[in-house]
Image (spheres, helix red, strand yellow):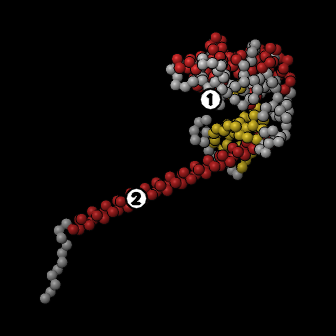
């Protein structure tokens, strides 16, 4: 007896095709996800490699800067300089300058702070008030329970009080009560907490800092800028007059280095760092006090 012929149930072929299509779509989606994962992993690896390379190049720039500064006393230490080098296919340029070129927020007298505010556009009376507030921020309160400066911050609706201790970072200037934000932004390139002295080095200071010195006028500033010579730091002292008490020429232990890097990929990275030359008996020849770079965004 012949076997009966088997036939597919109605619609079975269509169901199988739909199932296969769903499986193919799922596999395609999985492949797409995996491709994105591989691409992101490769990109992350390249970014990580570039970050490591950048940090190594900045460290090399700082070490070569320290090499140019070690072995001198403060009086004879170079106050500025520039050099470049190539490591692999990457290029590095370094310009360094003594922190004596900047006004020290923790040590500068009121007159110098006020002078800088005037140079940056503040009215003289406002500049004196701003300088008073900067000095008050860094000044320990007097004995007793009264603390007028802290009360003034509360009255202004601020949720913090004055530090009443040394500035820990120049950017802390943004927290000082009543200082206009634009004034602070303009002041930051000219101030520091690493000068180590109340006086500035007029041979290395920016024109704005020279103009901030007490009893300065534009003619004297122009003459100082024309005649000053870091290799002959005493040359301009006779031009200072009453401002001489705010000036101390010569090297400092702290130096700021501006580092400009072009990686082998063509990417450009800028860094700003401050290093401190150690005492002769220190096991470390120098220390890095501050380091910023724009690898992940603007400094």
In front of the other: 227 or 297: 297
In front of the other: 87 or 243: 243
Return the x and y of residue 41 as percentages of the image width and height. Answer: 52, 54
Residue at image location 76% in from the left, 41% down from the top = 286
**Can I make out residue 298 in this image?**
yes
Q: Is residue 127 above or below residue 298?
A: above
Quadrant, the N terminus: bottom left
Q: According to the image, label 2 marks what residue?
A: 30
Alpha-carbon span between mark 2 and mark 1: 49 Å
Q: According to the image, label 1 marks what residue?
A: 171
Return the x and y of residue 208 as percentages of the image width and height. Answer: 70, 21
**Quarter of the view holding residue 153:** top right
**Quarter of the view holding residue 25:** bottom left
In front of the other: 184 or 45: 184
**Quarter of the view holding residue 198:** top right
Of the numbered discs in the image, which one, if any, rests on residue 128? none
Return the x and y of residue 19 as percentages of the image width and height. Answer: 28, 64
Return the x and y of residue 121 as percentages of the image width and height. Answer: 63, 16
């Amino acid at each position: 007896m012949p076997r009966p012929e088997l036939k597919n149930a109605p619609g079975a072929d269509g169901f199988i095709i739909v199932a296969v299509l769903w499986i193919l779509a799922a596999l395609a989606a999985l492949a797409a996800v995996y491709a994105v994962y591989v691409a992101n992993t490769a990109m992350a690896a390249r970014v990580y490699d570039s970050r490591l390379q950048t940090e190594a190049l900045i460290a090399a720039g700082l070490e070569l800067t320290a090499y140019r500064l070690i072995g001198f006393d403060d009086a004879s230490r170079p106050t500025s300089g520039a050099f470049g080098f190539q490591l692999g296919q990457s290029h590095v340029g370094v310009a360094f300058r003594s922190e004596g070129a900047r006004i020290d927020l923790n040590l500068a007298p009121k007159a110098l702070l006020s002078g800088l505010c005037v140079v940056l556009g503040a009215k003289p009376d406002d500049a004196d008030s701003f300088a008073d507030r900067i000095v008050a921020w860094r000044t320990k309160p007097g004995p007793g329970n009264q603390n007028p400066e802290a009360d003034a911050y509360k009255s202004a609706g601020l949720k913090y009080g004055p530090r009443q201790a040394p500035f820990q970072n120049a950017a802390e200037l943004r927290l000082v009560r009543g200082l206009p934000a634009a004034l602070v932004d303009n002041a930051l390139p000219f101030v520091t907490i690493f000068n180590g002295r109340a006086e500035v080095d007029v041979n290395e200071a920016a024109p704005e800092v020279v103009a901030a010195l007490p009893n300065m006028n534009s003619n004297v500033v122009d003459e100082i800028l024309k005649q000053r010579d870091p290799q002959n730091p005493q040359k301009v002292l006779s031009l200072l007059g009453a401002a001489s008490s705010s000036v101390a020429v010569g090297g400092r232990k702290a130096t700021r280095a501006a580092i400009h890097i072009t990686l082998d990929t063509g990417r450009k990275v800028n860094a700003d760092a401050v290093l401190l030359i150690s005492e002769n008996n220190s096991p470390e020849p120098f220390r890095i006090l501050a380091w910023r770079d724009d690898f992940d965004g603007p400094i």
